[in-house]
Image: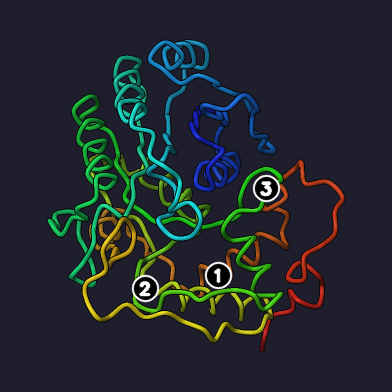
Amino acid sequence: MNTVLVAGVETVAGANLAARLADEFHVLALTLNHPDKTVIENCDSACCPVENAQSIAHWMNAVQPQRVIYCGDAARTSWGDDLNVPLEQQRAILPAEWAKACHEFDSTFTYLSTDAVFSGPWMFHDEQSQCFCTTDKAATFRQMENDVLEQHPDALVVRTNVFGWSPGTEPGWLETTLTEIANRTAGPFSSSRYATPIPASWLAELIARSWAEEITGVFHIAGSERVSEFQLINKLAMEFGLTPVLNAVSEVVERPQGFGQGETSLHCSRVRKALFVPMPTVSESVARIHEEMENGFRARIQPERGARSLQPWESEFATARIA
């Protein structure tokens, strides 16, 4: 069985990708720049406390993976709490170091980038769009993409916007938002900031399909529908049997400024044609998130939760779908 090294499983993207890919591959779930490893069931979990060229070479030598997926700062969603995670400028070179090591070891390399490199004014952005966000953070992420392809010309660079269950015991954006909706303390949410989010586990399936089709270069892999933060939150509320959120904030006076604040929706026609598959709708996406709580998938990325009080949206009553 091929070995896949998922670097960055402390992120929502990394944890969910590792858990889903473990159904088809031998997966090493590697936590980056942290003394404690993130445990993902059905994966070999390990920790890389200090991420540098030497540690990257060590892991490549030790594991000899056929494929590597890097889920760093750019893999974090541009919506929610992750928006405020500061970019560690000293880490900007590391995706390229992983790409270089993969090229030397003849391993395929997949790099998760972000839709927030864009910022309107168009509703959808294809891979050739030049409507870039002008923030330093977005410029750094674009440079990372270029550096990765320079070091590994056959790498796959995936621009996306993922959401899903957070690894470990600390609640992330999804868990916190559902709890706030249940407690009626959620919001306000933007009704003018649009994106094309996709469940991280669904992204994992499309990436595996991309490997099978051997596509390389920059591809947009995201949801099929453009949705505002306010709309997505209310779709989640309805799916989990919770009271919809009524308070919204609109920023239509002028073009929004800032990383992840503008129009970041991705046009995915290129990958649809390459893989011969549709991208998920918003309804399909929130249904997938709900199913993952009920079918045990969520528990696979949160095995250390242990016994604790259930949140209102986790109770049997709250999880009954609205007809």
Report the mark closest to the observer, 3 or 2.
3
Residue 91: x %, y % from top left:
37, 28
- Specify few, some or many for label 2: CA neighbours under 10 Å numbering under 14, 14-19, or 20 or more: many
Q: Which of marks 1 and 2 is nearer the N terminus?
A: 2
Q: In which quarter of the image is residue 196?
A: bottom left
Q: Is residue 185 left or right of residue 225?
A: right
For residue 170, the mark is: 3
- Residue type of the residue flagged with mark 2: Glu
Question: Image point 35% across, 26% down: which residue?
Answer: 90
Q: Which residue is the extreme one toward the bottom?
A: 323
Measured along the vertical axis of the image, is residue 192 above or below residue 118?
A: below
Give the residue at mark 1. 286
Residues at discs 3 and 2 in contact (Cβ within 8 Å): no
Q: x%, y% of residue 116? A: 31, 55
| Residue type at numbered disc 1 | Val
Q: Mark 2 points at which residue?
A: 225
Q: Quadrant of the C terminus?
A: bottom right
Q: Position of residue 108 (x, y in %)?
A: 35, 29
